[in-house]
Image: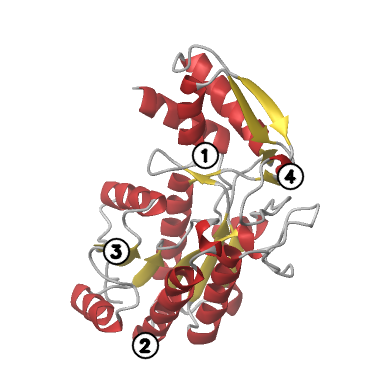
Amino acid sequence: MSAQAAMHLLVTGANGQLGQCLADQLKAQNIAHPLLSRQDADINDTVVLEKIIADKGVTAIINAAAYTAVDKAEFEPELAIRVNVDGPTVLAKLSARFDIPLLHVSTDYVFDGNKQTPYIETDETGPTGVYGQTKLDGELAIQRHATKYIIMRTAWVFSEYGNNFLKTMLRLAKERDTLGVVADQIGCPTFAGDIAQALISVAQQLHESEEQRLPEARYGIYHYAGDEAVSWHGFAMAIFEEAHQQGALANIPVVNAIATQDYPTPAKRPAHSVLSAAKIGVDYAVRASEWRISVGEIVRDIAG
């Protein structure tokens, strides 16, 4: 039997939270990975992408590019569609053309948030805003045009990179003595570094399978999120308590629990969007993100 060719991943969305976490881990694991940001190439540019895939010998695509401005999407749906629907459509067609897997990141916003138990992959979708609808349409486009795909839905993403809830809370805690944080939206915080590792692990297992001839069930939709459900208020308190314990925050502000109706936003948020990560655990032995541990590590890194 001939030696197996090395895995070579194409990563889109290189400048985002997830893209930067992917770059860190792929570099640490010495996995070849051309990175594409918006400045490098438009994910809608079939000609450019086709050349990169052919020239670099790409064996799989990880699409971390996304339009994630939930509220702004209500006012600029065309841009959200271009990134969240048109881009994945192009990548799905290239995946099929080159017969390589496409690993695509989606969101809990494809659900309406009315289910009181954790969402599983086969639950009925029902987005309530432009962002969620474009992400769902992107999923459907991938299913329509590709055969070797992993759609990984995640939620409440945070990291040391970019703008996110954790970094916003740490900043506000140093500026204010009192904060109001929504307490009636429940979800699972997820460390972007864990999402990156989950994607890499799945890609490696796909690559290592003989000629990628896997049972059909191992392709498809998966959920990957934090291991513990919490409200935004609870998440904020966990961040503050960790920062205070580490000495990165002198005083914990008073955090008032407020209702969603007291903090109106242009886009409606899912009230209960807990995702079950059981399926990916069974099929790929990937464990849910231990978000409390990651909060501690990020606070330490930022404070250091």
Check if mark 2's residue and mark 1's residue have beta carbons within 8 Å: no
Query: Which dot marks residue 165?
Result: 1
**Up-down relation of residue 246 to residue 223 (above or below):** above
**Up-down relation of residue 239 to residue 75 (above or below):** above
Residue type beneath disc 3:
Arg
Residue type beneath disc 2:
Arg
Q: Alpha carbon of mark 3 to alpha carbon of mark 1: how far? A: 23 Å
**Label located before the other in sequence (3 or 4):** 3
Element at badge 1?
Answer: helix
Q: Alpha carbon of mark 4 to alpha carbon of mark 1: how far? A: 19 Å
Query: Which dot marks residue 38?
Result: 3
Task: Count residues near mark 3 (Cα–Cα under 10 Å), then give few for <14, some for 14-19, many for 20+.
Answer: few
Residue type beneath disc 4:
Gln
Residue type beneath disc 1:
Phe
Which marked residue is nearer to the observer: mark 4 or mark 2?
4
**x and y, in percent, of residue 162 in the image:** 38, 44
Q: What residue is drawn where x is 62% and y is 58%?
A: 108
**Up-down relation of residue 152 to residue 264 (above or below):** below
Element at badge 4?
Answer: helix
**Label located before the other in sequence (2 or 3):** 3
Q: What residue is drawn where x is 58% and y is 67%?
A: 130
Q: Please identify the quarter of the rendering in which residue 193 is found.
A: top left
Mark 4 sits on what residue?
261
Element at badge 3?
Answer: loop
Residue lying at the far right in this picture: please name it: 116
